[in-house]
């Protein structure tokens, strides 16, 4: 358990440092990579504490990566889009099974609050850090962000892969206005690390 705890703390500190140094949208990819590593460490720690089998390393929940690692793939069709399989957390899987809408991460845009996949190019690196480029374009096909990943500039900017989730291929975030606050990265509250209480391992990294 100590190793999981130390990995989570290390990832938390890295995410804070990366966010403090971020000056353009591309820099946020390193932040969300670190956040995702930390969340998985917390999930592993919670499993060890409860005597449960250790979790499989899976992508986070597509609808909102803050939900933590996914537990399954579910069929989902976005409004006006094509059907596809996406990784989902247990809560969103239950919502979909009940015919309800998933709990989607929405962000502010000039057109009001929109799902992150319809929020513009600045969220490409944010999502890429969580999912990796090999998986991401297929998840986002038919969305605003997915359309921006179709060009060769995306591959040029994000050629490196992430973990077991593959490499990048397609999109452009150049020229996007950057404000770190747009990504919800409030790390000041400790991200659920206060006093060493991980609260089941669900909370890591503030608004990310």
Image (cartoon, rainbow, N blue to C red):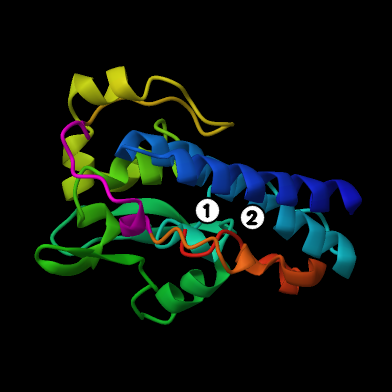
Identify the mark at residue 60; answer none if there is no mark: 1
- Residue 90's spot in the image, x, y percent? 57, 69
Please check the rendered image and state whether residue 56 is part of the magenta-colored stretch, yes or no.
Answer: no
Query: 200 and 147: which one is in front?
Result: 200
Please give the label number shown on residue 78. Answer: none
Distance between mark 2 and mark 1 Cα atoms: 9 Å
Nearer mark to the viewer, of 2 and 1: 2
Left or right side of 63 for 37: right
Query: Residue 11, located in which quarter of the rendered image?
Result: top right
Q: Are the residues at dot 2 and dot 1 in contact (C-beta closer than 8 Å)?
A: yes
Where does residue 83 sit, x and y in percent of width and height? 27, 54
* Residue 58 percent location from the top left of the image: 59, 47
State the residue at coordinates (73%, 70%).
194
Q: Position of residue 174 (x, y in %)?
A: 19, 31
Q: Determine the image quadrant of residue 171.
A: top left
Does the magenta segment cover residue 182? yes
Q: Which residue is mark 2?
A: 39
The image shows residue 151, relative to residue 188, as above or below, that is above
Q: Is residue 55 left or right of residue 37?
A: right
- Say which residue appears at 56% left-offset and 46% top-offset: 15
Q: In the displayed structure, would residue 27 be above or below residue 115?
A: above
Helix, strand or loop for disc 1: loop
- Nearer-N-terminus badge (2/1): 2
Is residue 125 left or right of 69 when viewed as pictured? left
> Can you see residue 88?
no
Closer to the camera in the image, 73 or 26: 26
Tag 2's secondary structure?
Answer: helix
Specify the segment rendered in magenta: 172-183
Using a 10 Å C-alpha cutoff, classify the residue at mark 1 as few (fewer than 14 neighbours), some (14 to 19) or many (20 or more): many
């Amino acid at each position: 358990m100590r190793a999981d705890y130390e990995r989570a703390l290390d990832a938390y500190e890295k995410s804070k440092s990366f966010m403090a140094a971020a000056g353009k949208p591309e820099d946020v990819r390193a932040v969300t990579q670190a956040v995702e590593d930390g969340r998985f460490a917390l999930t592993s720690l919670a499993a060890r504490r409860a005597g449960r089998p250790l979790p499989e390393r899976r992508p986070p929940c597509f609808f909102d990566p803050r939900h933590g690692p996914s537990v399954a793939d579910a069929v989902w069709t976005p409004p006006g889009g094509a059907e596809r399989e996406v990784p989902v957390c247990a809560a969103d899987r239950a919502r979909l099974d009940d015919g309800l809408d998933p709990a989607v991460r929405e962000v502010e845009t000039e057109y009001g609050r929109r799902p992150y996949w319809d929020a513009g190019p600045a969220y490409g690196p944010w999502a890429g850090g969580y999912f990796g480029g090999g998986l991401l374009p297929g998840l986002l096909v038919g969305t605003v962000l997915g359309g921006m990943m179709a060009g060769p500039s995306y591959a040029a900017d994000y050629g490196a892969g992430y973990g077991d989730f593959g490499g990048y291929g397609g999109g452009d975030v150049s020229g996007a206005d950057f404000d770190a606050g747009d990504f919800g990265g409030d790390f000041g509250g400790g991200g659920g690390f206060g006093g060493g209480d991980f609260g089941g391992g669900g909370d890591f990294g503030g608004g990310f």
